[in-house]
Image (cartoon, rainbow, N blue to C red):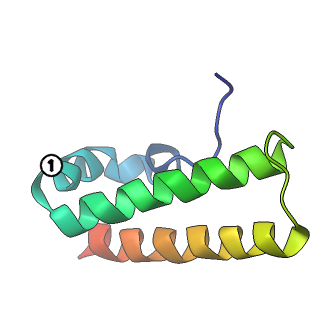
Amino acid sequence: MSHTPHELHEEFPEHAERIQELKGSDAHFARMADEYHKVNRAVHRAEANIEPVETLTESEMRKKRAHLKDEIYRLLSA
């Protein structure tokens, strides 16, 4: 499988342990992390032309990924 950029542990290496901890102890965080993972994979597949999508759709997926990343960071920083 190819390397997928923007994985959470790469985006927030200083919070790697906290990410694992929250995935196991906070259901809301775990859902957000799962959703981020799904959207990130979809963006990667679109960017790599594995599953091409319309330009607008790809843009919307990137916005959703950015929003999820911001929310995850907010929870990590709390």
26 relative to 46 in the view: left or right: left
Callout 1 amino acid: Gly
Q: As rendered, which of 10 and 55 lies closer to the eye?
A: 55
Q: How many marks?
A: 1
Q: Callout 1: few (<14), some (14-19), or many (20+) C-alpha neighbours within 10 Å?
A: few
76 relative to 57 in the view: left or right: left
Measured from the top left, where is residue 46 in percent x and y?
79, 51
Q: Residue at x 51, y 53 (%)?
A: 38
Q: Secondary structure at mark 1?
A: helix
Q: Residue at x 52, y 45 (%)?
A: 10
Q: Which residue ends up furthest to the left in the rendered image?
A: 25
> Compared with residue 51, is residue 27 higher up or lower down, i.e. above or below?
below
The quarter of the image holding the C terminus is: bottom left
Q: As rendered, which of 39 and 52 lies closer to the eye?
A: 52
Measured from the top left, where is residue 27 in percent x and y?
17, 63
Q: Which residue is mark 1?
A: 24
Measured from the top left, where is residue 40 in percent x and y?
59, 54
Measured from the top left, where is residue 3 in percent x and y?
65, 30
Q: Residue at x 79, y 46 (%)?
A: 51
Q: Residue at x 40, y 76 (%)?
A: 71
Q: As rendered, which of 27 and 54 lies closer to the eye?
A: 54
